[in-house]
Amino acid sequence: MSRLVLRNVGRTFGGVTAVDDFNLALEEGELVSLLGPSGCGKTTTLRMIAGFMAPTAGTIEVDGQVISSPASVLPPEKRGMSMIFQSYAIWPNMTVAENVGFGLKVRKLGGDEIRRRVDEILEVVQMSALRDRYPAELSGGQQQRVALARSIVVKPALLLLDEPLSNLDANLREEMRFEIRRLHDEFKIAMVYVTHDQAEAMVTSDRIVVMNKGRIEQIDAPYALYARPRTRFVAGFIGRTNFLEGKANAVSVDFGAFSVRKDALLSEGALPDRVLVSLRPQSIHLVRHEQAIAEGHCRARGRVERRAYLGEYWDYHVALEGVAEPLRVSTRAQEVFQAGDTVFVDVEAAQLTVIS
């Protein structure tokens, strides 16, 4: 049985639909991220799961029991869930240890049991040495660890995280992504994680729900989302990509600068007359001189229009004859081309993803 199930969940505000026909089953011990731009409905969905807001359509279930519907909503305090907010929401007048143990005290556990569990979780989040400090004496990353410890120590049925790293600087965010994933793997708590940061979702998640305008665009594992996006929105939102439009005939698809056999394109159904594909910048290879074409590859002549050096790689814009927009191409730092250089673009057909 799934830990959390959302069935046809919707939420409207007046005449505005914030969430529309949302369906998701979260398994025990799974971490699922809700990812999308501002206003896509991800936080509204999380608030409905938490019980802060009632759905206007559909039901939300935990362990087979309906906890939210348009007719009734189980109060948040009776759901057995913990939630971490952007602001951390830790008590400024309590020490680290007191903050972490507060939920256990509310649950009326004995003093010895509270101390034991607080000691254990502080050790896990590497905050034992700071147990007697107050929040004002902690860095942002340390405060986030306290919030995580406080949420996990009560052993919730479900942990909800609402953009928990948005207040941290870039280096701390990167560190805490891995910390959240480590804690998840250690405690196996089912988690729903809201973020607009693609890297955050890719690092932390078992599956990602990509949302757009209140609806689900695609649910998949991080690798599958990136490698095989199903819609133009997902392809453009997850990482960088090139969109190419081709015209299909009986045996191939013509993209202007090159053509690809139909049977070389991965598609879930029959190809339409007009075919739209996504091609990632790092899936394109640039060479100076024309070489033999490997099986399953295609070749086109291009010209480097501009370039940017980004330390780990070069970002090139390469114009191809017959293609409206220049291709974005990422190469290794040692693969250096000048603006104006004639190059040959090598593309593996299997890297062209047909999208709707």
Image (spheres, grey):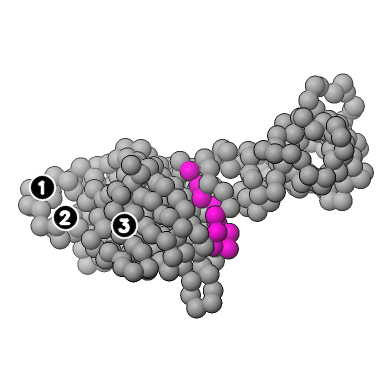
For mark 3, what is the residue? 66
Q: Secondary structure beneath disc 1?
A: helix
N-term-proximal mark, 2 vs 3 = 3
Q: Secondary structure beneath disc 3?
A: strand
Which percent across, then down, holds residue 343? 88, 35
Q: Are marks 2 and 1 in contact (CB under 8 Å)?
A: yes
How many numbered marks, from 0 up? Answer: 3
* Amino acid type indicated by mark 3: Val
Q: Are marks 2 and 3 in contact (CB under 8 Å)?
A: no
Check the picture and name the quadrant holding the N terminus: top left
For mark 1, what is the residue? 113
N-term-proximal mark, 3 vs 1 = 3
* Amino acid type indicated by mark 2: Leu
Which percent across, then down, holds residue 229? 63, 44
Magenta stretch, main secondary structure, is: strand
Q: CA distance from mark 2 to mark 1?
A: 9 Å
Examine the rendering and report whether any part of residue 338 can be seen. no
Magenta extent: 207-216
Q: Is 209 covered by the magenta stretch?
A: yes
Residue at x 46% of width, y 58% of height: 8
For mark 2, what is the residue? 104
Residue at x 44% of width, y 65% of height: 57
Residue at x 51% of width, y 50% of height: 209
